[in-house]
Image: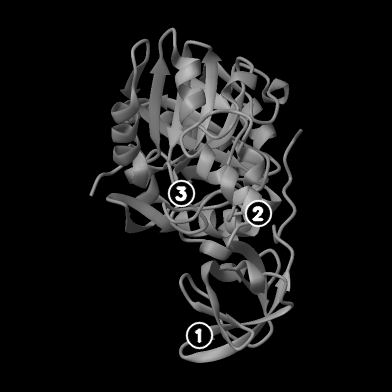
Amino acid sequence: MRRTIFYEKHLAHGGKMVDFGGWELPVQYTAGIVEEHKRVRSAAGLFDVSHMGEVRVAGPKAEAWLQNMMTNDITAMENGQVIYTFMCYPNGGVVDDLLVYKVSTENYFLVINASNTDKDVLWFHDHVTEGVTVENLSPQYSELALQGPKAEEILKKIANFDPASLGFFRFVENVKVAGVDALVSRTGYTGEDGFEIYMPWDEGAPVWDAVMKAGEEFGILPAGLGCRDSLRFEAGLPLYGHELAAYITPLEAGLGVFVKLNTEFIGRHALAALKENGVPRKIVGLEMIDKGIPREQYEVRAQGRTVGRVTTGGYSPSLDKSIASALVEASAADEEEMFIVIHGKEKKAKKIKRPFYQKHYKR
């Protein structure tokens, strides 16, 4: 398994290391998943996300090429802006969901899912055209995510710029954090305010130490994969392979706002037809009435038959309830009562609104 530059930091904080897509990463630390989760919601947590992939797309035709590759409108972006978007197959299924950072019309920085990095880079190279270069920069970057309502105050103590000046889904290059050259964006995957810090691969350790020290007065905790998943799930943020996949379209996932059908991109015709004819499946939110913890791929039943499966489920520390997202047949999506099959037994659940937790972003 591959290790990030922060491996020794994880061990020092009692990190329970697991295999995550070929990376040895902490699922939790000494405090435990629930406490880490609550600390991110109330103060701050620090995540090692150095396993994520980074790609540079550059050249005189970079903007036009990306416009054809992405579902969102690249031409509407401003320099210094970040957007969330999808890459789709011709049938409308998702290759990946990712972030696009615009440096200029000839220079873009893409952040892609770790498990999809090799697949995505191959997809890019299979479609690259004259006037565009694609470079996989993943081995060059370490990345930390500082998340929570105290993130701005913490970062301000160790950065050479004022984080308050950075708007939501905006970024700044060529700044220093704890004396280390960095790119910083006001983005994250928790539903809280926060920042993602990209720095040279082998220079990340001093930044980790500086963030943890600056956050001591606020009770900052290192946070692992376990609470990263529970945080994003509560906030209704999708995870590739769960709410999105090659066989799940953005429209079925309820994320059509990031699909601009007035632009031309791979998969547009299939998605336009789907929108016109109506999606066959929808993501719904469920809260357990009967005792039981819903898990991924558990069967969902309604109207006396199987109508879908759980995409993500578990205990919500913020709500103190067991909840689930499920992909179900559109004809069953309005059912107020459904059943999740847990250990062979139907357990009653009720439909509730998603996201389960109100996001707290600084606009």
Q: Give me the C-alpha separation between circle 1 and circle 2.
A: 24 Å
| Disc assigned to residue 235 | 2
Q: Residues within 10 Å of mark 2 (few under 14, many from 20)?
A: some
* x, y percent for residue 91: 44, 47
Q: Is residue 6 left or right of residue 266?
A: left
| Disc assigned to residue 19 | none
Q: Residues within 10 Å of mark 3 (few under 14, many from 20)?
A: many
- The residue under label 3 is 93
Most extreme residue toward the bottom is 345
- The residue under label 1 is 342
Q: Residue at x 67, y 69 (%)?
A: 333
Circle 1 — which element?
strand
Q: Residue at x 56, y 71 (%)?
A: 314
Q: Indicate which label's residue lies in the foreground, 1 or 3.
A: 3
The residue closer to the viewer here, 269 or 110, is: 269
**Res. 189 visible in picture:** no
* x, y percent for residue 326: 57, 68
Q: Is 67 placed above or below 224 here?
A: above
The residue closer to the viewer here, 229 or 64, is: 64
**Mark 3: amino acid:** Gly
Q: Is residue 229 left or right of residue 319?
A: left
Q: Indicate which label's residue lies in the foreground, 1 or 2.
A: 1
